[in-house]
Amino acid sequence: MDKQIICRVRDINRAIAELERQFSQRFDVNINEAMLLCTLKEKGELSSGAIAEALGLSASNASKVIASSEKKNLISRNLCKEDKRQMFFSLTPIGKEKIETMRNEQIDIPEILLK
């Protein structure tokens, strides 16, 4: 593997970590929680499996993001009307307000992530 590729991946990883730190400080959410809010804003109510797929996370990692977002009252859990074993998740009013705040504020994206 080319050394330049490894160094570029390192730089991208650092930029993502810095972006996540800024998100956390500014909005009190991590990147995965922000992506969850954005996904629910765009797609509406989703199952945990659909959330995992949309976010590109394993089922267990998606479950952690869902749980942390629920604790912050950003999303709510709803039973499926047809199958009571199935859960769906949607934005709460607080979650809707949070995603709108994030969308309306200027976020400094590291240059390396814009290429």
Image (spheres, grey):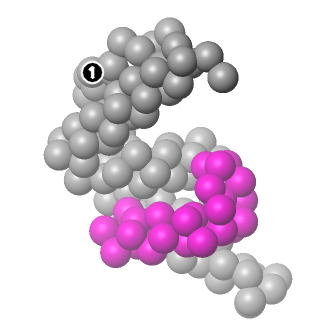
Say whether residue 40 is left or right of residue 103. right
- Residue 49's place in the image compared with 4, above or below, is below
For residue 31, above or below residue 106: below
Residue extending furthest toward the bottom:
84
Q: Position of residue 15 (x, y in %)?
A: 35, 28
From the viewer's perspective, is 104 left or right of 4?
left
Between 59 and 5, which is closer to the camera in this rendering? Answer: 5
Residue 71: x, y in percent? 34, 75
Q: Is residue 37 visible?
A: no
Percent across and percent down for residue 76 are: 48, 72
Q: Kindly identify the residue that appears in the image at 46 percent across and 51 percent down.
A: 32
Give the residue furthest to the right: 82
Question: Element under label 1?
Answer: loop
Q: Name the residue nearer the viewer: 80 or 19.
A: 19
Residue 48 lies within the magenta run: yes
Q: Residues within 10 Å of mark 1 (few under 14, many from 20)?
A: few
The residue nearer to you, when weighing 2 against 43, is 2
The residue located at (54%, 18%) in the rendering is 3
Considering every residue shown, the one lying at the far left of the view is 25
Q: Going 24% across and 48% down the picture, which residue do you hit?
A: 24
Is 33 drawn above or below residue 27 in the view shown? below
Q: Residue at x 48, y 19 (%)?
A: 8
Q: Quadrant of the N terminus?
A: top right
Q: Which residues are magenta?
A: 46-75
In this figure, which residue is indicated by the disc labeled 1?
A: 108
Position of 89 with respect to 107 (left or right) is right
Classify residue 6 as left or right of residue 72: right
What secondary structure prevails in the magenta region?
helix
Number of marks in the rendered image: 1
**Amino acid under label 1?**
Asp
Residue 30 locus on image (x, y percent):
34, 51
The answer to whether residue 22 shows anywhere in this view is yes
